[in-house]
Amino acid sequence: MSYRELIEKALKGRTAAQAARDWHIPGMTLHRYVTGERTPNVSTTLLLAKEAGVTVNYAAQAVAEQEETLKNRTITEKFSANFDYLMSLVRPRQLYVSAR
């Protein structure tokens, strides 16, 4: 089972926002776990294992593999999404030109 499959199984069809409320985890934190930007701490990994119905060892292995994947990303990969977002904010907007 991959990290993504672990998360999907633990969510049980709920949105990340619904699961965050149920699990008493900040919504943005769970969002980062769901998108793979970050990996959960030990207590959250235990919760994911319980919710997904898998062993703690299985969940810990999936989380460890995701951590390794995150470590191996290049600098470009790490910052490209944020850079694209920032660039979208500074791109010149079309000026409104009256038809009169």
Image (tube, grey):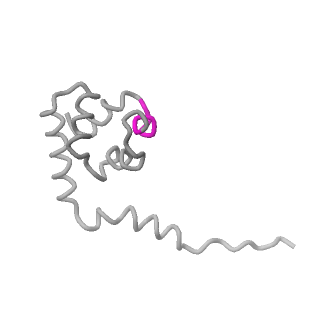
Residue 68 percent across, percent down from the top left = 15, 52
The image quadrant where one finds the C terminus is: bottom right
Q: What secondary structure characterizes most of the magenta part?
A: helix
Q: Nearer the viewer, residue 43 or 58?
A: 43
Residue at 53% from the left image edge and 69% from the top image edge: 89
18 falls in the magenta region: yes
In the rendered structure, the answer to whether residue 88 lies left or right of residue 43 reads: right
Residue 30 in percent (x, y) is at 36, 44
How far from the left and from the top, in percent, is residue 13? 40, 28
> Which one is nearer the viewer's eye here, 61 or 51?
51
Q: Residue at x 33, y 66 (%)?
A: 79
Say left or right for 11 vs 58. Answer: right
In the rendered view, would you say 42 is above or below 98? above
Q: Which residues are magenta?
A: 14-20
Q: Residue at x 19, y 51 (%)?
A: 67
Instruction: Classify residue 56 by image quadrant.
Output: top left
User: How many numbered circles are shown?
Assistant: 0
Q: Is residue 59 left or right of residue 10?
A: left
As drawn, the residue found furthest toward the right would be 100
Q: Residue at the location (17% across, 59% down)?
A: 72
Image vertical order of residue 11 relative to residue 25, above or below? above
Specify the quadrant of the image occupied by residue 61.
Answer: top left
Judge by depth and name the residue closer to the eye, 51 or 87: 51
Any magenta on residue 15? yes
Q: Is residue 99 above or below residue 36?
A: below
Task: Return the residue nearer the eye: 53 or 86.
Answer: 53
Quadrant of the image occupied by residue 97: bottom right
Image quadrant occupied by the N terminus:
top left
